């Protein structure tokens, strides 16, 4: 009998014999030695992209607190909804953790017929850092500022293509926002994450992206793509040369892609508490803070790095964004 089947058998026996009290004791026993083997963190986008980068920074530091390596598994497709589904259906034993963000855990619920419920089938662990997007293009676009870029897009819209991580992904919502704000149209090309999309932007196969700073800043610094604005009211401390959308001519075009950790619904509270503490330890570590700041990530206050903080924030974001996404006509193709 494997560890998991033993636990399931114990829980089934507890349910038959002793009801809730015994179930709680089994859950506490499960949590006591947790983790006895490496947990897996499911990243719902391609390796090397922004979600994957945050996952690896977190996993590396969480290992110290948990005493076990946290394995990263990239489960891609349908703007992250396949990977999130994998977490929702996994055993609630603490060995499957999901990382996701604003689009996977908010936007996707408005546009995909998901076979899981974002709130009922997943339990929140901790709110993680947020980063804005950069409006970026391939290097040889002739525009030198955002106003010129909008004029160039308008003059060439039949030929222009924009990269996304799939319908409903953060990069897709950013792209649709850009089109709506500027009254322009271009063709979207979906990828399994913004890492492969960025490769095609660097090679000039596609023309434009609204992409998280975590993914695009290294390419901007390498002079491989051009950045026109940051989708935030404040410039990034780590890239102060990039103007805000307000300064560059698209006032109010704000997008903040916040991240979070979730586990399958029903994971024992003691295990969730250990994961929350490990995430908080990671975010309090100055080395982690420096790496995140370099990528344009802003760390939420410690009281938000909790199940209650993430749960309340996610619900508020659903209430805010679902009507906006539906009104913008963003659909799963
Ligand atoms: C990724 O990791 O590829 C991104 O988070 C995708 C996106 O939503 O734009």
Image (cartoon, rainbow, N blue to C red):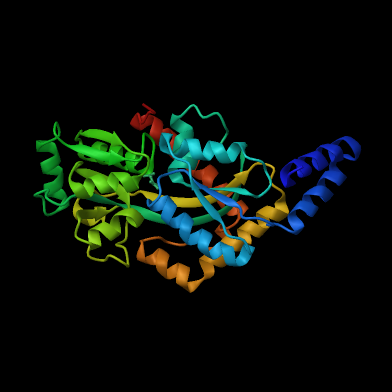
User: In this rendering, would 165 be left or right of 147?
Assistant: right
Q: Is residue 154 left or right of residue 121?
A: left
Between residue 325 and residue 73, name the one nearer to us: 73
Q: State which quarter of the image contains the N terminus.
A: top right
Quick one: which residue is furthest to the bottom in this view? 286
Query: Residue at 51% across / 29% down in the picture?
Result: 114
| Viewer-nearest residue: 155 or 77 | 77
Does 327 appear above or below 47?
Answer: above
- In the figure, is residue 135 to the left or right of 322? left
- Position in image of residue 92 (x %, y %): 67, 43
Asked if residue 252 is positioned above or below residue 120 in the image, the reply reads: below
Residue 148 percent coordinates (x, y): 11, 48
Image quarter (top left, top right, bottom left or bottom right) of the C terminus: top left
* Residue 258 visible here: yes
> Image point 32% across, 67% down: which residue?
237
Residue 259 percent coordinates (x, y): 47, 51
Toward the right, the furthest residue is 17
Q: Quadrant of residue 326?
A: top left
| Callout count | 0
Q: Which residue is rendered at x = 75% and y = 41% of the image? A: 5
Relative height, residue 53 to residue 76 (above, below): below
Q: Which residue is drawn at 42% across and 36% down?
A: 77
Camera-side residue of 25 and 251: 25
Image height of 57 relative to 25, above or below:
below
Tell me the quarter of the picture where residue 69 sits. Answer: bottom right
């Amino acid at each position: 009998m494997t560890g998991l089947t033993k636990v399931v058998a114990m829980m089934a026996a507890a349910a038959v014999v002793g009801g809730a009290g015994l179930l709680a004791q089994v859950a506490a026993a499960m949590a006591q030695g947790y983790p006895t083997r490496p947990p897996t963190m499911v990243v719902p986008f391609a390796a090397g992209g922004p979600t994957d980068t945050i996952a690896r920074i977190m996993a590396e530091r969480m290992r110290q607190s948990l005493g076990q390596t946290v394995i990263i598994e990239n489960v891609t497709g349908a703007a992250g909804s396949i990977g999130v589904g994998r977490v929702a259906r996994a055993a609630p034993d603490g060995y499957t953790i999901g990382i996701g963000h604003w689009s996977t855990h908010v936007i996707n619920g408005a546009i995909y017929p998901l076979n899981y419920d974002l709130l009922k089938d997943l339990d929140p662990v901790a709110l993680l850092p947020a980063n804005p997007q950069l409006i970026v293009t391939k290097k040889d676009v002739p525009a030198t500022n955002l106003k010129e870029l909008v004029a160039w897009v308008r003059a060439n819209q039949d030929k222009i293509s924009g990269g996304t991580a799939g319908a409903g992904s953060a990069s897709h919502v950013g792209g649709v926002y850009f089109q709506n704000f500027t009254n322009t149209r271009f063709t979207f090309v979906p990828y399994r994450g913004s890492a492969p999309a960025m490769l095609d932007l660097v090679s000039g196969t596609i023309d434009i992206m609204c992409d998280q700073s975590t993914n695009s800043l290294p390419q901007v610094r390498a002079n491989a793509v051009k950045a026109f604005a940051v989708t935030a009211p404040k410039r990034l401390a780590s890239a102060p040369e990039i103007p805000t959308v307000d300064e560059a001519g698209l006032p109010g075009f704000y997008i903040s892609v916040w991240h979070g950790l979730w586990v399958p619904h029903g994971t024992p509270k003691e295990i969730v508490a250990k994961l929350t503490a490990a995430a908080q330890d990671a975010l309090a570590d100055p080395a982690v803070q420096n790496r995140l700041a370099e990528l344009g990530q802003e760390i939420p206050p410690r009281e938000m790095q909790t199940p209650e903080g993430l749960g309340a924030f996610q619900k508020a974001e659903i209430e805010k964004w679902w009507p906006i996404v539906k009104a913008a006509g963003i659909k799963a193709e």
